[in-house]
Amino acid sequence: AVPLKIMFSVMHSKYSGYAGSVLGVELRLEGLADALLQKFSKMNKREWKLSDLESLLKSMNVQLSSQKAVRVGITVTLKGTIILRKAYYGEADKASKKVMKLLNDLRGRGGKNNYNINHQRALTYGLDLYEQPTDAGTPMFYINSMTTLFNLKATVNKGISKGVLFRDLDYNIHLVTNGVDMLSFVHGKNRFQIYQTRAYRLHVPQHLVIGVNIINQELKLQMKRPQQSNPMFLVLHAKNRVSVVDLSGSGSKLATFCPGCKDEAEISNGDPQSKVIGHDDNSDYGYKFWGEYFDCEADLSDANVGGNAIYAFHPQNKNPQSFMTSLLMGLRQARTFVMFYPETAKCGAYVQWSQSSTNPVTDIQFIAQVKRQSGKEKYFYSENKILVKSQLVMTTPNGKRDHKLNIKYNNGVGGVTNELMAQYIREKSAELPAYAVCFSFENEYPELPDTFQGGDLHQQLSYSGLLKVRYGETKSCKEAQGRIVTKIKHETTPEATQTLKTKDYYKKCMEEKQSATWQNRQALPVTPSCWLATYDASNARKYSWDIKFEGVSPEVRAYFEKGETVLKTAVLPYWDLDPKALARSLDAQPELKLDIKFKNRDKLVDVKLETDKGVSDFKDMPVNVPVLDGPLSN
């Protein structure tokens, strides 16, 4: 009967000391244990003669505890203010109905099958005021605020059809946000201020139908693409101003200090520009995209925009230097730039998405079914088989376009053996020919030892894999003309094995193995140091890829040439190479062999590239990025 409280909150902190709550959800459960016990353990009162037992215990002056009441409550707070509070009370034998009522209310069950929503919400988020006196003793302050107005208009239909629980949502979302950053100080009877205003507007019109078939583990999703007369769009604009305010309330005094200025002056170099980000009115896929910069005085050159995008995701200014850190912190850096725009030059951007002008896709339907099966087990690993069937149907004035994607994945115990097969089929339509892409990948790692952590750290290990891709304008993979076959082999190296013996975690692992705690264990100790040593010992340093192309299509030829250009750019400034080895070799049935070997504590790498036109061998190339995970490259 001990109360159980579950809390979820979203908070923020600023200036290393100020904390605030944005959203909080609290769920409190009391007396639920008895209710669950009676729910799953039904007892025949006549057979057990509970009334006679109760009389007997009372005659013996045994105090019987009363039945615990069940109490369930939920509280939702926004910025520290309670916006929703519900509570349910009942005896244990009636608690299941009360709890189910609470859950049904939360998931929207009950009530009308169709209803309308018209909600408006305004929220000021991130209002900060920082004030301190200047050296002259007059006040100076910085203020930052962001206010958002949210509007949702929707028509909702719900129900069940042929075993499918569905929600039909026809909605329009309008989001208007205004942000202000201001720095101001007082001198005499005037307040001097410089501030930036940022405006954002988002419009999302959508008709969405979501259905779930729990028994068949199937998801159905249907949506209508916005029309050109009511497109989905996003508008952003920011600019900076200066002004002087008379504290006596007589109005602006900027003209006193700036003859010819109005009430406020906009900071500008007087040369705003516009530039199209992208324009694609695509009749093949039925969409129209338009993006542009407008009223912008910032540097819009491709070099500056592209350089800033690369810098945002570059690992050099992030720690730890890993892929996920670069991705997540890069997204955060890009989001911060858009939300706060730390630039003096004014600039605006506009993005629009809708149906195409000709042959538009008006309706998109997606169906997915997932099946999973478990098999043999070893340690805490298990064998898994997953089957995914999906279909995407797009409706156009000329008919439907049918796309099918099936994926089958067999994962052996501990991932020792893996098999991945995928098949994509595009049916022939009025605009596009039939097309098929079939993919298969098989690989095999060394067998797991009989005991966990029972492997030999000095044993040389190898991994093999086979990748096949077939593609072409056909409905059958067997008839596809394009074919790519890749043989893969990864190996550990004797040099890395010897280097492992000099690393701290290996030495500590050997000390732990001789300790009284672990000396009777045949395998390695189950400790962090031994885990790192095992990971390092099994980490491949030698990679060999043998790729053969047959029936190369123009699309694959273009991708190959782009990859060839990137490779040339990467290696040309540092090493001698045979230009013929990287020359276009796709005229017939080219073959490419790539060998990569890391050495010298993963700080140097040898790369050998071999084609039918020649061989290029690059020795002792410095590795500036921790390819094999930073902590293990010591």
Image: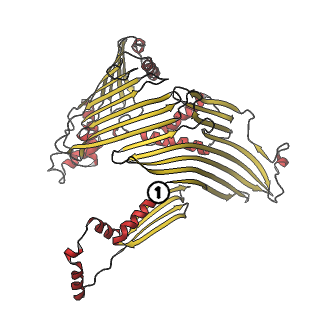
Q: Nearer the viewer, residue 233 or 449?
A: 233
Question: Which quadrant of the view contains residue 239?
Answer: top right
Query: Is 112 placed above or below 255 here?
Result: below
Q: Quadrant of the N terminus?
A: bottom left
Residue type pointed to by label 1? Gly
Side of 632 relative to 559 (left or right): left
Q: Is residue 261 visible?
A: yes
Q: Is residue 1 visible?
A: no
Residue at the location (41% across, 23% down)? 435
Task: Give percent across and percent down for residue 383.
Answer: 24, 41
Question: Which quadrant of the view contains residue 227?
Answer: top right
Task: Give percent across and percent down for residue 615.
Answer: 35, 14
The residue pinned by badge 1 equals 108
Query: Is 451 placed above or below 95 here?
Result: above
Side of 521 relative to 147 (left or right): left
Q: How crowded is the residue under tag 1: few (<14 C-alpha within 10 Å), some, or many (20+)?
A: few
Label 1: element kind = loop
Question: Which quadrant of the view contains residue 626?
Answer: top left
Q: Quadrant of the C terminus?
A: top left
Query: Is 214 placed above or below 65 here?
Result: above
